[in-house]
Image (cartoon, rainbow, N blue to C red):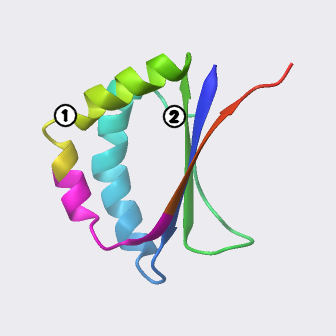
């Protein structure tokens, strides 16, 4: 199993609007292809305007095939366009359980 641990740094003061679009458009599309997320979090203490979400995959091949299918979804470009200009940066980590 691997986890896609993704952190978005959102432009200050745009977090509420970004979260509204993210939850309404991105999350339903992701759930359609990836299943239920492990979690969606906003940072309370530490760097502000940070969204972290995590999704589980069987292995790297599962990750690649599901993301390819999601990227081909006709609603995906609409979400990308709606959130254009909201992010400062993004960090993606693929992590695995040890032991």
Q: Is residue 36 magenta?
A: no
* Residue denoted by label 2: 37
Q: What residue is at 62 percent from the left and 75 percent from the top? A: 48
**Residue underneath mark 1:** 73
Residue at position x 74%, y 72% in the image: 46
Q: Nearer the viewer, mark 1 or mark 2?
A: 1
Give whichever of 94, 5 is nearer the camera. 94
Residue at point 51%, 34% (across, down): 37
CA–CA distance between discs 1 and 2? 18 Å
- Label 1–label 2 contact, CB within 8 A: no
Residue 86 position in % (x across, y down): 36, 72
Mark 1, residues whose alpha carbon is within 10 Å: few (<14), some, or many (≥20)?
some
Residue 72: name its quadrant: top left
Residue at the limit of the structure toward the right, as seen here: 99
> Residue 16: x, y in percent?
42, 72
Q: Secondary structure at mark 1?
A: loop
Q: Residue furthest bottom?
A: 13
Residue at image position (48%, 82%) is 12
- In this rendering, position of residue 1 left or right of residue 11: right
In the picture, the quarter occupied by the N terminus is top right
The residue carrying pointer 2 sits among few (fewer than 14), some (14 to 19) or many (20 or more) residues within 10 Å by Cα, namely some
- Vertical arrangement, residue 24 with respect to residue 8, above or below: above
The image shows residue 93 at horizontal and vertical percentages of: 61, 44
On screen, residue 67 above or below 20: above
Q: Position of residue 31 (x, y in %)?
A: 38, 31
**Is 8 in front, or is 35?**
8
Relative to 13, is 25 on the left or the right? left
In the displayed structure, 84 sits above or below 65; it is below
Residue interval drawn in magenta: 78-89
Residue 30's place in the image compared with 90, above or below, is above
Location of the C terminus by quadrant is top right
């Amino acid at each position: 199993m691997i986890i896609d641990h993704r952190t978005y740094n959102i432009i200050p003061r745009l977090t509420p609007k970004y979260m509204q679009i993210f939850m309404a458009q991105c999350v339903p599309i992701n759930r359609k292809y990836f299943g239920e997320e492990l979690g969606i979090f906003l940072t309370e203490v530490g760097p502000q305007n940070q969204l972290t979400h995590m999704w589980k995959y069987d292995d790297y091949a599962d990750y690649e095939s599901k993301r390819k299918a999601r990227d081909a979804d006709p609603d995906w470009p609409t979400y990308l366009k709606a959130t254009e200009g909201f992010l400062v940066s993004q960090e993606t980590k693929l992590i695995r359980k040890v032991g």
